[in-house]
């Protein structure tokens, strides 16, 4: 009897950890939905990115609520005391004359001590809004790339670690607008999702207009926040507690190979993208109330996960169509499989 109880304890501990992770996700959901109206799908994907440790690229026009969304997310997390001066939220307005040091920080000479002191830049935050990222030069984009890829910045040959929760929510103007630089493929590959924000539904827009006084002077949602350690614990619980069957892994690989073989594609899905997809699918399953990843998760996330990473040949169809076509057969096989944890 004692051995049976011992066998059950890990599962019970895992269930409790997943329950706490769902509480963290629901707390974030509630705060963001109070701040942003009519963007439930976008909110869920941003929460998934936070729980999966990824970054988000929003493609939108001005006035769609991206700043409020990023700030509300940052202010939903209680900042821990940190000598590196980590803050909940920072916004960087990207312009053609921006310098890498405007992002990473700079060493300043202290005449009293006779030494240089590092002054952290705006990337030292839980959530960083990189506004209009494609309006700046490739040199500045490469500085942000190190921060996104390595969660660190290097200034004067000294490496400074960023916060564990470091999340970039970048926005880009639709390509073709004046003064834009296309993001290089390596940087696009660092974004977990690209989300295209369209205009919200009529009823939601009416609600926003009706509450115009609060919208002009936003005071972000009250109620409980989540601690930094709560989010990190949720990440760990999702990684260990949401089952990813072999069939799901095979489906991901088969989708990638189908995309690469498509004659419309010049540059396909990287292996890095497949690795990044797994925690995102696990986080999506958590929000759906499951402890296993299924076909519904991949169907919901495939386009925002993969479409922005593709380079198509001249005159080819839209990247989302390529991903959907490549997804059809592997997804059908996955839907027939038994994926729950045995």
Image (cartoon, grey):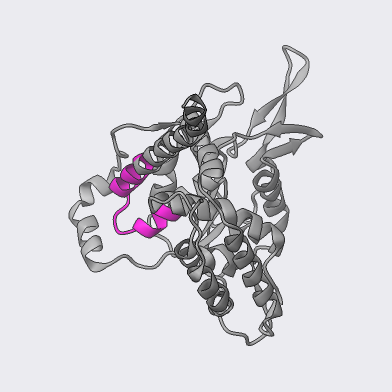
Tell me where the magenta segment starts and ends, as one range: 27-45
At which x and y percent is residue 184?
69, 63
Viewer-proximal residue among 183 and 237: 237
Q: Main secondary structure of the magenta part?
A: helix
Q: Does 293 appear above or below 254?
A: above
Is residue 201 toward the left or the right of residue 228 in the image? left
Q: Residue lying farthest front?
A: 1
Q: Residue lying farthest left?
A: 210
Q: Does 105 appear above or below 29?
A: above
Q: Does 239 appear above or below 175?
A: above
Q: Residue lying farthest right?
A: 157
Q: How many marks?
A: 0
Q: Is residue 266 visible?
A: yes
Q: Does 252 appear above or below 49?
A: below
Q: Who's the residue at 37% across and 38% down the image?
A: 23
At which x and y percent is residue 70?
44, 47
**43 is within the stretch colored magenta:** yes
Q: Who's the residue at 35% across and 39% down the image?
A: 27
Report which quarter residue 61 is drawn in.
bottom left
Q: Who's the residue at 35% across and 43% down the image?
A: 26
Viewer-proximal residue among 279 and 338: 338
Viewer-proximal residue among 282 and 83: 282
At which x and y percent is residue 177?
54, 71
At which x and y percent is residue 280?
53, 53
Q: Who's the residue at 63% across and 87% down the image?
A: 315
Q: Residue lying farthest top?
A: 112
Q: Is residue 173 visible?
A: no
**65 is within the stretch colored magenta:** no
């Amino acid at each position: 009897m004692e051995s049976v109880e011992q066998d059950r304890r890990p599962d019970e501990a895992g269930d409790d950890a997943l329950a706490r992770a769902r509480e963290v996700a629901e707390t974030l959901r509630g705060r963001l939905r109070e701040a942003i109206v009519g963007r439930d799908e976008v909110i869920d994907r941003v929460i998934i990115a936070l729980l999966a440790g990824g970054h988000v690229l929003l493609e939108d026009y001005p006035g769609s609520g991206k700043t409020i969304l990023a700030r509300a997310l940052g202010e939903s997390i209680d900042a821990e005391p940190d000598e590196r001066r980590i803050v909940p939220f920072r916004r960087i307005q990207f312009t053609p004359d921006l310098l890498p040091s405007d992002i990473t920080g700079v060493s300043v000479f202290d005449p009293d001590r006779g030494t240089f002191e590092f002054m952290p830049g705006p990337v030292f935050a839980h959530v960083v809004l990189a506004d209009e990222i494609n309006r700046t030069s490739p040199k500045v984009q490469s500085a942000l790339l190190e921060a996104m890829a390595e969660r660190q910045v290097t200034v004067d040959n000294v490496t400074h670690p960023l916060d564990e929760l470091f999340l970039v929510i970048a926005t880009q103007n639709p390509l073709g607008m004046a003064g834009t630089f296309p993001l290089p493929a390596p940087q696009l590959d660092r974004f977990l999702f690209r989300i295209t924000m369209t205009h919200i539904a009529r009823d939601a827009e009416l609600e926003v207009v009706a509450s115009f006084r609060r919208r002009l002077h936003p005071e972000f949602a009250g109620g409980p926040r989540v601690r930094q350690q709560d989010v990190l614990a949720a990440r760990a619980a999702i990684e260990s507690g949401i089952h990813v069957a072999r069939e799901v892994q095979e489906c991901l690989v088969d989708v990638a190979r189908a995309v690469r073989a498509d004659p419309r594609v010049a540059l396909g899905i990287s292996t890095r993208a497949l690795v990044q997809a797994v925690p995102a699918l696990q986080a999506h399953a958590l929000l759906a109330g499951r402890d296993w990843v299924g076909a519904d998760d991949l169907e919901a996330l495939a386009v925002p996960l993969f479409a922005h990473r593709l380079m198509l040949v001249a005159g080819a169809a839209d990247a989302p169509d390529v991903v959907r076509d490549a997804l059809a057969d592997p997804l059908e096989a996955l839907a027939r499989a038994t994926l729950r944890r045995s």
